[in-house]
Amino acid sequence: MLLRLMGGRVIDPAHGRDGIGDVWIRDDRVVEAPSDSLRADTSYDVTGKVVMAGAIDIHSHIAGVSVNTARLLMPEHHGASQRRPDVTPLANAGWTTAATGRLYASMGFTTVIEPAVAPHYALHAHLELADIPIIDKATLAILGNDDFLLGLLRAGEGGAAIRDYVAWTLATSRALGIKVVNAGGVAAFKSNVREFSLDDVVPWYGVTSRQIMKALQHAVRDLGVPHPLHVHCNNLGLAGSAETALATIDAAEDLPLHLAHLQFYGYGKEGGRGFSSAGARIAEAVNRAKHVTIDVGQVMFGQTVTISSDVLRQFNARPHARPKKWAIVDGEANGFGIVPYEYRATDFYNAIQWAVGLELFLLINDPWRVFFTTDHPNGAPFTSYPEILALLMDRNLRAQWIGKLPADAMALTTLPSIAREYTLTEVATMTRAAPAKLLGLSDRGHLGPGARADIAVYADQTDKADMFRGATLVFKDGRLVVRDGEVIDQSFGQALVVSVERDRSIDRRLGDYYERRYGLTTDLLAVPESAIGKPDPFELVPCVS
Ligand SMILES: [Zn+2]
């Protein structure tokens, strides 16, 4: 099957392309324009439209036991609009798996990363991801508060043992990368610790947060995992957390490091309330640290629910729950906490948070190193993406919002003075080309020959929120799945899994450890292909040498 997208404005930053032209698709791949004698089986006239690769979200909590607990905690979010006929316990929950895939696809997103899967819950997460239609997905496995790793560090074992353990975790839980959440802080919480910073020591293990993070950063790098260690820093959300962010950026040294939802660490202690924006300072530090990438975790106003494996932080956040209910679940290594929250435009602190995210987007110069997220659903649901893109592309729209927000809050940020407006090429870089590169997905995020035919076509409108809310056409693997913002067809994508080598003696060692510690076999952690119940559920992503 040969398809032709004809006469659109093709924006493909990976190939420096921004101009009127065609994109050709044969089956599931983008191909060179064929010789004149060949005619397309189907042509789509996309004159006046913008053509980009499918978008990639690198950090969105869409599946797993914590997400399901949030669904159970918030029955009032279960809308009739998302009702489906199957009578299962969560069949009518808001944000069903079906709705997640369809809503993402309608905005032109074709790959989404679930960034926080505890290895013990990996099978559940993969079963749920496999039930999300259209999009491809992947997981990041969480390490850094687990007894086995902290035990290796306490015993002073070398890098080889840690590398093998990381490789075993990636293989067993079928992950694309490794995330660390409040390294050591969550373990310390079990000893009643309520505050934990980069150089604090985890009780019992005698190692610092910094040592844990550096050990994992080196292991991930040395194994050739394309995605750098994905770090949720200590002290999330606190006044003065900017100091933690700056210290963590420094700690990256000359190795790649990704800092997740940096907005939540962009707070200083200035002003009458001891809470101010440090967005400009942090953006400057990121601009200087060429090995550091970040995603923003933008806050938008409205009701949401926060979901995090940072049990220490979520426990401390309980008093702010709105509505007044929460769930904290502890477990081996990272448990999780669910705290509903409403960001209000009239609230001084929430207004600062909103501004900090935009400052990071607008003051970090390189769109290849700043990634587009709300940390769904922590800063806002992913359905707010079109409104955020509009704010980035239109300073007048920002000025209107700034005018409505508490003036004392805006006086403590640099946002009102920032004139930058994102171009469509910068948007395509940040949401397509850069995330594909960051994750090691060479056939995504671009429109060159050989690329997977994941393509989004948008009407080129002045109202950018409208433009990005519903794509005119979306192709997934060459198949037309969205027309005029409506899903018209769906298949099921794959989970992307990195393939790395390990010394198999670690398998025996972990087998002994689980037997001795829990009386369990490590088979319980495995994600067998046969369990998924769909053909070809996994796609292997090669490591880098
Ligand atoms: Zn997150």
Image: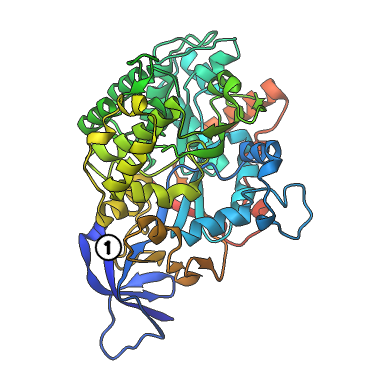
Instruction: Please determine whether, in this image, residue 204 is positioned above or below residue 218.
Output: above
Q: Quadrant of the N terminus?
A: bottom left
**Nearer to me, 430 or 139:** 430
Residue 51, visible in the rendered structure:
yes
Q: Residue furthest bottom?
A: 37
Q: Position of residue 123 (x, y in %)?
A: 64, 43
Q: Quadrant of residue 544?
A: top left
Q: Residue furthest right?
A: 87
Q: Quadrant of residue 263?
A: top left
Q: Position of residue 280 (x, y in %)?
A: 26, 28
Q: Quadrant of residue 315?
A: top right
Q: Position of residue 335 (x, y in %)?
A: 61, 27
**Nearer to me, 405 or 441:** 405
Instruction: Please determine whether, in this image, residue 410 is positioned above or below residue 437.
Output: above
Q: Residue at x 38, y 44 (%)?
A: 372
Q: Amino acid at mark 1?
A: Ile
The residue indicated by pointer 1 is 11
Q: Secondary structure at mark 1?
A: strand
Neighbourhood count class around disc 1 (C-alpha, 10 Å): few under 14, some 14–19, many 20 upward: many
Q: Quadrant of the C terminus?
A: top left
